[in-house]
Image (tube, rainbow, N blue to C red):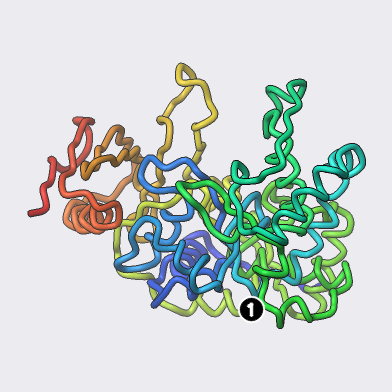
């Protein structure tokens, strides 16, 4: 295995910010670069997937992704790092998720075959359907308190979804509309032969590196989010390094791997010093230990932390200015009003020019969430309230 390339933290910060936040011409350019975007339903100022897209696209508004998914059929609701939106060309490799997820739903298929048969039959004859629209009805009161609840239709649909027999074909008020997989996945992709499991694992490892820029081999399991256990993952990474597909890097003691394409960004200048509001589950933030080591920014997403124990707030976004994290902000938008609930400025934040570009970024954010007024409820925030005529 070749010796790692020595890179300074300053240079890797510059390359990572260019890799992630150079503006893209359209949604599919973002999806093809990131390989997937994690779907999360919490929506204080749009959802995570909306926030990922707004930080990379001019003129993106909350919900614009739905046309790309459900009318243009270029992306799909699937599984990658948790529930995600994925370009359809990534579907063949992710078919193995269906196999890997099957053991977790074996009891549904073994104990409730009548429900599986009835639901698939209804979808075949009547689909697409919301769970409540199925004629088949059954409840298991002993399932109360479980993740999906006592509704047998809902639980069975999730089993079928995770194992690849049904897919989301649309959403109504945020709820999944289901249909058979063969009516959702393009025919040319379904006709492809199943890759070997080893081929799929290699490609999925490469997709993580293409998406994130730099990946530490010791990154937490949830970042990889598929069943490639540590010894096998290390062996496959060594193989990819030997082939030249990945390059070892040493960032002032932080060991990771990157693609040769990513490393060409080291020769580019920094992006213009814009302010960006970063989604909590953005690819840049997936390995928070890397962010802490490289950017000196310790980020914790506290939505599941009890309120009394929160340090920063409920749904706090990292704030980038140029190549530096300069603060954390909690927004909330409803009925045309963007509220700044909390602001925490980093102690080493640069001041020169920050307020001007912050205002530009806020106006873009207001357009993104269709707000005409911004109310500031934290006196530490650097700007006063704003109104857009």
Answer few, some or many: residues within 10 Å of disc 1's Cα (few below 14, many 20 plus, some between 14 and 19): some
Q: Is residue 6 above or below residue 123?
A: below
Check the picture and name the quadrant holding the C terminus.
bottom left
Q: Is residue 181 above or below residue 142?
A: below
Q: Is residue 67 above or below residue 167?
A: below
Name the residue: 24% across, 57% down.
Answer: 367
Q: Position of residue 342 (x, y in %)?
A: 30, 33
Check the picture and name the quadrant holding the N terminus.
bottom right
Residue 335 found in image quarter: top left
Res. 291 visible in picture: no
Q: 36 or 354, which lies in front?
A: 36
Identify the residue under disc 1: 260
Res. 354 visible in picture: yes
Looking at the image, residue 36 sits to the left or right of residue 65; the answer is: right
Q: Position of residue 124 (x, y in %)?
A: 72, 61
- How many marks the image carries: the answer is 1
Name the residue: 48% across, 69% down.
Answer: 68
Residue 381 found in image quarter: top left
Looking at the image, residue 139 sits to the left or right of residue 24; the answer is: right
């Amino acid at each position: 295995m070749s010796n790692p390339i020595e890179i300074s933290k300053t240079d890797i910060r510059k390359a990572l910010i260019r890799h992630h936040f150079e503006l893209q011409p359209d949604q599919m350019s973002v999806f093809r670069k990131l390989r997937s975007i994690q779907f999360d339903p919490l929506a204080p100022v749009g959802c995570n997937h909306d926030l990922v897209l707004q930080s990379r696209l001019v003129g993106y508004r909350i919900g614009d992704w739905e046309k790309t998914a459900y009318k243009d059929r270029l992306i799909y609701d699937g599984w990658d790092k948790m529930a995600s939106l994925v370009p359809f060309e990534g579907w063949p490799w992710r078919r193995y998720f269906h196999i890997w997820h099957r053991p977790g739903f074996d009891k549904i298929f073994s104990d409730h075959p009548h429900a599986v048969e009835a639901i698939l039959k209804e979808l075949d004859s009547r689909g697409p359907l919301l769970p409540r629209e199925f004629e088949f009805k059954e409840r298991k009161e002993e399932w109360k308190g479980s993740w999906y609840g006592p509704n047998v239709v809902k639980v069975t649909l999730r089993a079928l979804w995770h194992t690849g027999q049904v897919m989301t074909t649309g959403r109504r008020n945020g709820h999944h509309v289901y249909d058979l997989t063969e009516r959702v996945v393009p025919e040319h992709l379904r006709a492809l032969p199943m890759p070997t499991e080893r081929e799929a694992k290699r490609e999925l490892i490469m997709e993580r590196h293409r998406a994130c820029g730099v990946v530490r081999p010791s990154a937490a399991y949830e970042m990889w989010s598929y069943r490639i256990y540590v010894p096998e993952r290390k062996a496959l990474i060594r193989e990819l390094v030997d082939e030249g597909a990945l390059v070892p890097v040493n960032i002032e003691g932080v060991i990771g791997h990157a693609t040769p394409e990513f490393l060409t960004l080291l020769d580019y200048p920094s992006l213009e010093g814009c302010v960006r509001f970063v989604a909590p589950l953005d690819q840049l933030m997936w390995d928070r230990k890397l962010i802490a080591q490289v950017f000196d920014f310790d980020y914790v997403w506290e939505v599941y932390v009890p309120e009394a124990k929160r340090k920063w707030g409920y749904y706090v976004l990292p704030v980038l200015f140029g190549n530096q994290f300069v603060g954390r902000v909690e927004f909330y938008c409803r009925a045309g009003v963007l509220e700044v609930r909390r602001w925490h400025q980093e102690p080493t934040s640069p001041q020169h020019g920050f307020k001007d570009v912050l205002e530009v970024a806020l106006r873009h954010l207001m357009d993104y969430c269709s707000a005409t007024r911004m109310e500031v409820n934290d006196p530490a925030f650097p700007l006063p309230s704003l109104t857009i005529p």
